[in-house]
Amino acid sequence: MQPIHWNERTHRPAPQTLAWPFAEMDQVFQQLFAPQAASKLVLPVDVVEREDAFELRMELPGVDPADVEITLHEGVLTIQGEKREPSLAEKELARLRERTCGKFRRQFRFSVSLDDAGVSAEHRHGVLTVTLKKQQSAQPRKIEIRNG
C-alpha cells in the first residue's frame, strides 16, 4: 500500500493518490499475465582460474544432467538447458509454487587459448563443474636469465 500524499494548500489528498489503486491493479495483471520468456533462469556461476586451467561451477539444483548441453566454440563456452517443472500426482493440487523453472543459457568468452580435448564436466550434488585446460602456449612459464 502506498502512502497518501497530502496537499497542504487545499487540505485534501493530492491528485496523484487517485491513480494508485489502478497502479496496484496493473501490477497484479502484469504478474498474472507476464510472458514466459521474461522468466528465463539466471543460474549463479563461479569462475576460478588456476595456472593450468579454468574451473567453472554452476548451481543446477533439480536439473537433470541430460537436459544440459555444453559446447566450446572459438573460445566461447556455452551452457544451456532447461529446468523442468515437477509434475504433480493425479490428485495433487499445487497451492503455491515458488521454485523457478524454464530454459537457461550462459556464455563465457575466454581470452586465452583453451585445449579443446582438455574440457571435462561433472555434475555432483546439484553443482555442475566444468574444467577447461589451457593450451601449453597459454600457460605462464618461467624464463631463465643467463649470465653473459
Image (cartoon, helix red, strand yellow):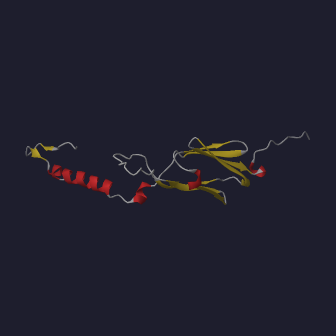
Q: Is residue 68 above or below residue 5?
A: below
Q: Which image quarter holds the N terminus?
A: top left
User: Which is more toward the observer, 75 or 10?
Assistant: 75
Q: Is residue 77 left or right of residue 29?
A: right
Residue drawn at 7 percent across, 46 percent down: 10
**Could one spot residue 105 in this view of the protein?**
no
Q: Residue furthest top?
A: 147
**Could one spot residue 35 in this view of the protein?**
yes
User: Which is more toward the observer, 22 or 40?
Assistant: 40
Q: Residue furthest front?
A: 91
Residue 83 is situated, as x and y percent measured from the top left of the image, at 50, 52
User: Which is more toward the observer, 4 or 144?
Assistant: 4
Residue 45 is situated, as x and y percent measured from the top left of the image, at 55, 45
Residue drawn at 44 percent across, 52 percent down: 87
Q: Residue furthest right?
A: 148
Residue 129 is situated, as x and y percent measured from the top left of the image, at 62, 45
